[in-house]
Image (cartoon, grey):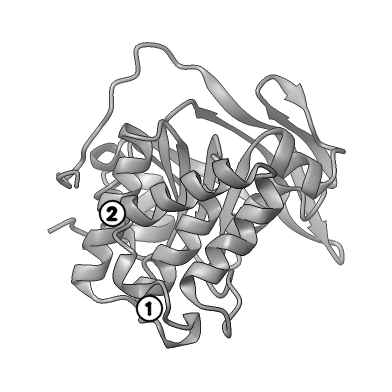
Amino acid sequence: MALIKKFRIKKFKENEPVLKLEKISMFFNKRQILSNLDLAINKQEILGMLGPNGVGKSTIFNIITGLKSPSFGKVIINKIDCTNIPIYERATKFNIGYVPQYGGFIQDLTLLENLKLVAEIHIKDKENRKIKIEKIISQFELEPLLQIKSKHLSGGQKKKLVIAMALINDPNILLLDEPFAALDILTIKMLQEIIVNLQSLDKITVVVCDHQARDLLSCVDRAIVLSDGKIIASGSPDEIIKDSGAKTAYFGDEFKIN
């Protein structure tokens, strides 16, 4: 597994945006959630999103996946405007994977049955399906858990399962919604290693949203801080914790990574 290092910054030879949000605004019942937001995420980048509750982080995920349409603005994936492309077509055509904070699997199915269920949806060839499942099982060291009903798995095991299910379709972009929530320190370290390996081994662009700022900053290349529906700070982990706007809106003056 990869070694997690503080402020592990990957230097990209060239900035090649795989996903862009252009002038995105979003209203709910006349309340503005996002305001003229611009965001470009580079190919094979690990991006972290931080900000107080209700600032629009989950809304950004919903707009990227197509679960919600922005009030104004465009969603560009691989240089194609997919703002009006529906959620299923967007997921399959642009290979977007999503790992929700809660659920994402069927409780009464075993771990193996959950993997097979997703594989049958995405992979038509039976032999290719079998090969993919075996690769995922090996990659995530799931062999001892295959016949356990998912509802009986630990929190970390459930998270590994949902990430594994999201990888069945070989996503180019993977969205992780609060992956570190309510997990112990060792399990968080395991998930950080998985996230780093998704980038380095699987060449996947990863976007992570979490309130565990220290854990998030330990495994991302770049982080953004949102406030009042806008990005108020963007940069490497060591840059972002020194940013005056980010301190005022989110970190406070006493925040330290250690």
Above or below, 181 against 138 in this view is below
**Residue sitting at 80 percent across and 41 percent down?**
89
Q: 69 or 100, which is in the foreground? A: 100
116 vs 16: above or below: below
Name the spot of residue 121 as percent of width and height, x first: 70, 53
Chain-order first, disc 1 or disc 2: 1
Residue 56 visible in the snapshot:
no
Q: Report x, y in % for residue 187.
A: 25, 69
Residue at the image position 47 percent from the left and 72 percent from the top: 111
Report the residue marked by disc 2.
192
Across and down, in percent, residue 97 comes to: 59, 48
**In this rendering, would 76 be left or right of 128?**
right
Q: Quadrant of residue 160?
A: bottom left
Q: Which x, y percent locates residue 90? A: 75, 40
In this picture, residue 141 sits left or right of residue 22: left
**From the image, which quarter does the C terminus lie in?**
bottom left
Q: Count the labels in the image.
A: 2
Q: Which residue is mark 1?
A: 155
Q: Secondary structure at mark 2?
A: helix
Q: Nearer the viewer, residue 185 or 136?
A: 136
Q: Is there any visible trace of residue 78 in the rendered image?
A: yes
The residue nearer to you, when weighing 150 against 40, is 150
> How many residues crowd around disc 1 within 10 Å: few (fewer than 14), some, or many (20 or more)?
some
Q: CA distance from mark 1 to mark 2?
A: 15 Å
Q: Nearer the viewer, mark 1 or mark 2?
A: 1
Local SS, label 1: helix
Q: In the shown orientation, is residue 203 left or right of residue 3? A: right
